[in-house]
Amino acid sequence: MPRFRLTVAYDGSAYSGWQRQDPPTGEVIRTVQATLEEVVSRVVGEPVVVHGASRTDAGVHAKGQVACFDYRGQVPVERLAAAINSRLPEDILIVDAAPAPEDFTPSCEAVTKQYSYTWAHGGKYGVLRPLFDRHFVAFSAYALNPAPMHEAAQCLVGTHDFLAFTKIDHGRETTVRTIHRCDVEGIDEHRLRIVVEGSGFLYNMVRIISGTLVEVGRGHREVEWVRSALDSLDRSQSGPTAPAQGLCLEWLRYPDERWRWTAGAP
């Protein structure tokens, strides 16, 4: 059956994450996957299952989520994105739709992905918490120094066991992951962005990395504490889980050149 790839952007504020949830009580839970499946099924005229590359948490956003679905319909591929977008709620957008190989699997074939996490900081010194972009920026009342945060972030680059940086009941066979890049960039005097690129991530991993680096940025912890937390393999030794709204899935990269262009990927 023909397969189609979607590049999807969404504001995750009103959704309980990406993954469809079917509780036994029959309660309707709004997720990005379920919303897409309902709309795409109406557009193509047959039931479809939309498979995504990354299971983003409730409140997390995406600029370049990658998904796919199969169908035998007659909607021309060049009209597919527009047809789906015309029926989607305003907080989800199909950036692109294209044919894909029949064996293309978004979650398994991605070789690297990038997340960003944005902070507004310094409220104790007269900076107001975010208002108009509050769903996309986390807030720290403490002033944060990006320089030691960036230095501490380099401790996480490479292949490590990230057991201390995931939820205790993570459910994964292995907690070893490879981080290619972890940078802290000052946007202006009261905003900064953490950028993390890796081969794959554990549940809450980027949010815990962000919360850990903030402990360094506010001067509560030293740079070497991050290395100690990583080596401890103990979740209680790392920092808090940062709020969901500051996190965004930027892009995914695939080994085939046909898929490398996805939303912002170099």
Image (tube, rainbow, N blue to C red):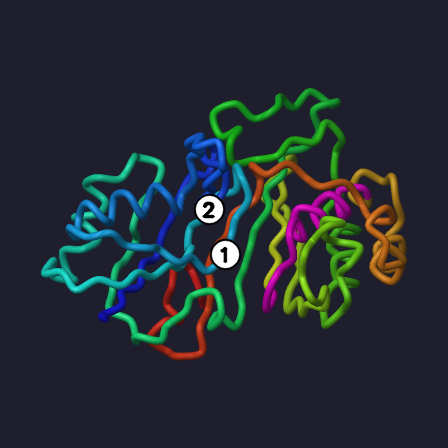
Q: Which secondary structure, mark 1?
A: loop
The quadrant in which residue 103 appears is: bottom left
| Type of amino acid at the residue the image marks with label 2 | Trp
| Type of amino acid at the residue the image marks with label 1 | Ser
Question: Where residue 106 sits in the image (x, y, percent)?
Answer: 42, 66
Q: Which mark is residue 54?
A: 1
In the picture of the structure, the residue carrying the numbered disc 2 is 18
- Is the residue 39 above or below the residue 161 in the image? above
Question: Where the C terminus falls, by quadrant?
Answer: bottom left
Q: Is residue 130 left or right of residue 170?
A: left
User: Could you say which is closer to the camera, residue 84 or residue 156?
Assistant: 84
State the extent of the magenta-drawn residues as a range: 198-215
Q: What whole-number distance in Å separates the C-alpha atoms at marks 1 and 2? A: 8 Å
Neighbour tally class for label 2: few under 14, some 14-19, many 20 plus, Cα within 10 Å: many
User: Could you say which is closer to the camera, residue 141 or residue 238?
Assistant: 238
Asked whether 121 falls inside the magenta stretch, the response is: no
Residue lying at the far bottom in this picture: please name it: 256
Q: Is residue 139 left or right of residue 28?
A: right
In primary-sequence order, the first of circles 1 and 2 is: 2
Question: Where residue 58 sits in the image (x, y, percent)?
Answer: 53, 39
Q: Which secondary structure, mark 2?
A: loop
Q: Main secondary structure of the magenta part?
A: helix
- The residue at the point 29 percent across, 35 percent down is 89
Neighbour tally class for label 1: few under 14, some 14-19, many 20 plus, Cα within 10 Å: many
